[in-house]
């Protein structure tokens, strides 16, 4: 208990006045015995105690009156927690959920208005730290209440779901940076189902061990709070409950575009692509007549009408093609008024490519048909280059059939073509077969071309790989090659310009964003390849023989490998007819074996992934992540960026020496889907807000030297210039705004007056996950449990929170009850004196005659 006017409490000493009067002015009398006195002795003995008791009560009342008067004037304060002096400053940590669900209904308005009223109630010396849930890793800015109001006005509620435990941990950490000893944490959220769910189970098991839960993390946070003296108070401001949202159990009615997917993943110029959108009706009433518009960038290309059942979904498919290379975005927008309008539109980035340039390094060259090591592989990669049917006649037939069926293809550039296919068929891959002895010189010419010609022209040289020796290869295939070409040369110093005299040609190629596909064979020198160190698995002995009577069969990959998910499962696998007579025994690293045993796909730290294995468990195809140079990409990986497959290793050759795989129908789609998946592995079609984007330089810049500049166009219309170099990728982390980000690379040349502008743009899209649009409240019992673990208190409006803050900070004044008690005591003193004592005397006078008689 504290007093606002502590001096006035000294007036309680005035109780000695009635006490002194009572003691000093007691009645003085003499005893005089007379004859009839003995008749009253018994009565006087009975009533003497009663008279004394009444006198003591009257004395107590008279002593309490000055005490109560002094206490009421001192204005005492009583608090259930450790109180803070009225004017002593407090450090506030305002943890605000800025996820997309907060923009539903009037939640964000209530949150901003409540925080504004709380800021208005703060004292002049208080400091405020605002932590948005989407920027937990950002440095905490400490300012005044006025600074906090400015930040509140700039907040946008369009981010991914709040990681509740990580957000509270950030708030506790911010308390340690506070300047004042007294701290208070206020969590403002709508407390949706996905906020307090178990969506982070894998991360919890990694940090807290197997079986860890949300409550386990909260217990750990509570321990950290308890180590701060004095312990900060935690409050929840729940803006998810309102009279505007009566349906708490089922959530608000909402229609959203749930997902966008593209098939195939790698899109080439003039190639037909299918865009599939899923629309979800998250309400209990059917939705009909919803207008859905297909978008390319911000242009509406086609519109259709859709109806959706209650709590149902609907899929829409749209076929299109693109006539120019470069990055763009496609998506769907629906016109429907509901609780959350931001999720009525969803986009996905795609990169339109020219035919992929692939080098096939043939380790067993032959002039005979289908006798070279790479003959089957080249047919699989470029099947139309070996077609004997007149393409024009086939195209005319397809066009007539398409006209009869009425199937339109709308091009991404706005032109419509009635066709079942594109106007002409082109191979996805432009393959070039070279011998191992030609690799080093051809690679050097690519490097020289990048330094001289590309920077001077600023134009992409596109053409057939057979006639263009200086084109950067996106993929290099080594088929039965004895040793890695251009290996380290101890007598040659490492060249700074990346030439073949450097420390490993393949290492330089992978660092520049290239990809490698390795096929085994009889000519392979296992020791030489193992010493190079970039294969995802070590080469061991060759097992089996061509005369094997019991060949191995391949286990269907099924949905375990995304690139081959369409090749069938256990019941209808296209691998059933494949027979393996010989294979290379390969050994995975410790990290790879651990990930394989646990069923995971490896880590970015160099672990490998088994993509294909035999029925006996022997790995036959293994993929490994790229080893990036520098720390920027590793930073991106640490912040949830992409993991880029750089090398795929086969324990089989690509001819028929060890198996019949090249002769089976599965070989062509298997190889083509693998190549497309490799090319798409560096793309991030959609990232969450706050996730770093990794953008790799265009092939024209990878082989050059010097600096270049990225021009970044943001969704809010602002542009940003970032200078980099030709040997590293761009990691862009300012991705908190939803929308499309466009990246264009410009070559910087000090010898030229102007910069050479690149022709190919890359696009990345930031979108909020669809689960954030499911507007359902968290379970109340679970929310109460979270409050108990943290010692928090929950409020549904800002006024209740402000009142509690005022009581905790200044305490509860009790002078009014004391004043009422004083009045009661004054009245009691008068009544007791008039009736209590008088009645006692009267009773004595009546009892006396009765006793005498």
Image (cartoon, rainbow, N blue to C red):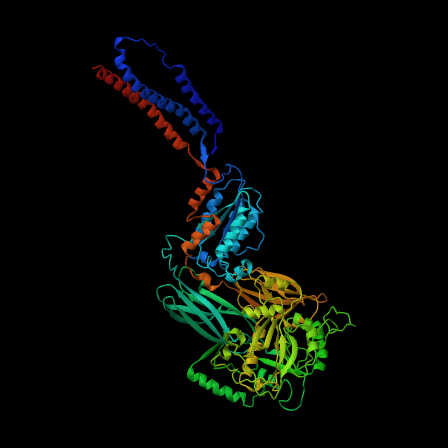
Judge whether 190 appears above or below 619 on screen.
Answer: above
The answer to whether 440 is drawn above or below residue 724 in the figure is: below
Q: Residue furthest right?
A: 491
Quarter of the image holding residue 670?
A: bottom right
Q: Residue furthest left?
A: 853
Question: Left of 355 or right of it: where is 806?
Answer: left
Expressed as whole percent of the image width and height from the top left, the position of residue 228 reads 55, 45
Q: Which x, y percent locates residue 150?
A: 52, 49
Left or right of 720 in this view: 443: right
Q: Nearer the viewer, residue 333 or 796?
A: 796
- For the C terminus, give its image quadrant: top left
Number of on-image labels: 0
Q: Please tell me which residue lies in front, 272 or 729.
A: 729
Which of 198/154 is in front? Answer: 198
- For residue 581, which quarter of the picture? bottom right
Pinpoint residue 371: horizontal percent, then vertical percent: 64, 89
Residue 662, visible in the rendered structure: yes
Q: Give the answer, above or below, for where 40 lies relative to 628.
A: above
Residue 600 visible in the picture = no
Question: In the rendering, at what x and y percent does residue 766 appear?
Answer: 53, 63
Identify the residue shown where x is 40% and y is 61%.
338
């Amino acid at each position: 208990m504290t007093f606002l006017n502590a001096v006035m409490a000294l007036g309680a000493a005035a109780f000695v006045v009635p006490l002194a009067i009572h003691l000093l002015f007691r009645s003085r009398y003499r005893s005089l015995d007379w004859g009839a006195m003995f008749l009253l002795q018994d009565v006087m003995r009975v009533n003497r105690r009663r008279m004394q008791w009444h006198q003591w009560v009257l004395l107590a009342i008279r002593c309490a009156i000055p005490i109560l008067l002094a206490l009421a004037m001192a204005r005492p304060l009583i608090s259930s927690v450790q109180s803070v002096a009225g004017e002593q400053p407090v450090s506030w940590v305002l943890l605000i959920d800025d996820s997309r669900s907060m923009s539903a209904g009037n939640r964000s308005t209530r949150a901003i208005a409540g925080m504004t009223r709380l800021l208005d109630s703060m004292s002049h010396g208080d400091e405020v730290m605002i932590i948005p849930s989407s920027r937990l890793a950002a440095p905490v800015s400490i300012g005044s209440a006025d600074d906090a109001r400015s930040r509140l006005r700039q907040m946008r509620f369009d981010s991914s779901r709040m990681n509740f435990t990580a957000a509270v941990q950030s708030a506790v950490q911010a308390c340690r940076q506070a300047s004042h000893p007294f701290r208070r944490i206020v969590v403002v959220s709508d407390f949706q189902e996905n906020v307090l769910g178990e969506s982070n189970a894998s991360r919890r098991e990694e940090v807290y061990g197997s079986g860890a839960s949300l409550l386990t993390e909260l217990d750990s946070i509570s321990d950290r709070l308890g180590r701060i003296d004095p312990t900060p108070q935690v409050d929840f401001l729940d803006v998810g409950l309102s009279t505007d949202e009566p349906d708490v159990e089922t959530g608000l009615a909402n229609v959203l575009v749930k997902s966008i997917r593209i098939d195939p993943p790698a899109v080439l110029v003039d190639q037909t692509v299918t865009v599939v959108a899923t629309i979800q009706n998250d309400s209990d009433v059917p939705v009909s007549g919803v207008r859905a518009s297909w978008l390319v960038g911000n242009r509406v290309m086609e519109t259709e009408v859709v109806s959706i059942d209650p709590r149902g979904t609907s899929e829409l498919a749209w076929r299109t093609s693109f006539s120019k290379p470069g990055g763009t975005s496609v998506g769907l927008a629906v016109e429907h008024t509901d609780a959350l309008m931001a999720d009525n539109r969803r986009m996905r980035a795609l990169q339109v490519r020219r035919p992929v340039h692939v080098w096939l390094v043939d380790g067993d060259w032959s002039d005979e048909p289908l006798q070279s090591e790479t003959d089957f592989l080249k047919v699989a990669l470029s099947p139309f280059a070996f077609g004997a049917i007149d393409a024009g006649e086939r195209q005319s037939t397809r066009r007539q059939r398409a006209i009869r069926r009425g199937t339109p293809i709308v091009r991404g550039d706005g032109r419509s073509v009635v066709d079942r296919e594109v106007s002409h068929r082109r191979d996805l891959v432009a393959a070039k077969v070279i011998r191992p002895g030609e690799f080093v010189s051809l690679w050097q010419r690519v490097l020289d071309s990048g330094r001289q010609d590309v920077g001077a022209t600023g134009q992409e040289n596109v053409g057939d790989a057979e006639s263009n020796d200086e084109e950067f290869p996106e993929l290099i295939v080594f088929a039965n090659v004895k040793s890695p070409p251009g290996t380290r040369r101890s007598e040659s110093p490492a060249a700074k310009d990346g030439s073949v005299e450097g420390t490993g040609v393949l290492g330089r190629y992978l660092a520049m964003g290239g990809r490698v596909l390795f096929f085994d064979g009889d000519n392979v020198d296992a020791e030489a390849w193992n010493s190079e160190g970039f294969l995802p698995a070590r080469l061991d002995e060759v097992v089996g023989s061509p005369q094997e009577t019991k060949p191995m069969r391949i286990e269907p990959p099924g949905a375990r490998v995304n690139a081959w998910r369409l090749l069938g499962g256990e019941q209808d696998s296209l691998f059933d007819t494949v027979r393996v007579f010989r294979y290379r025994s390969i050994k995975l690293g410790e990290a790879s074996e651990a990930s394989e045993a646990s069923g995971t796909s490896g880590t970015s730290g160099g672990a490998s992934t088994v993509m294909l294995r035999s029925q006996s468990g022997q790995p036959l195809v293994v993929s490994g992540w790229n080893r990036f140079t520098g720390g920027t990409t590793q930073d991106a990986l640490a912040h949830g960026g992409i993991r880029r497959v750089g090398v795929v290793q086969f324990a089989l050759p690509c001819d028929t020496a060890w198996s019949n795989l090249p002769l089976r129908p599965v070989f062509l789609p298997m190889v083509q889907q693998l190549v497309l998946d490799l090319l798409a592995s560096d793309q991030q079609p959609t990232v969450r807000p706050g996730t770093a984007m990794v953008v790799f330089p265009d092939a024209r810049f990878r082989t050059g030297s010097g600096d270049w500049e990225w021009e970044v166009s943001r969704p809010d219309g602002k542009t940003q210039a970032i200078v980099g170099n030709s040997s590293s990728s761009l990691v862009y982390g300012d991705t908190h705004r939803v929308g499309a980000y466009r990246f264009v690379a410009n070559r910087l040349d000090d010898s030229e007056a102007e910069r050479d502008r690149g022709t190919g743009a890359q696009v990345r899209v930031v979108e909020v996950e669809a689960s954030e649009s499911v507007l359902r409240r968290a379970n109340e019992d679970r929310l109460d449990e979270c409050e108990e673990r943290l010692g928090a208190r929950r409020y549904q409006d800002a006024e209740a929170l402000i009142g509690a803050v005022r009581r905790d900070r200044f305490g509860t004044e009790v002078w009014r009850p004391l004043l009422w008690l004083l009045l009661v005591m004054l009245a009691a003193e008068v009544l007791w004196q008039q009736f209590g004592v008088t009645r006692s005397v009267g009773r004595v006078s009546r009892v006396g005659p009765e006793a005498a008689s």
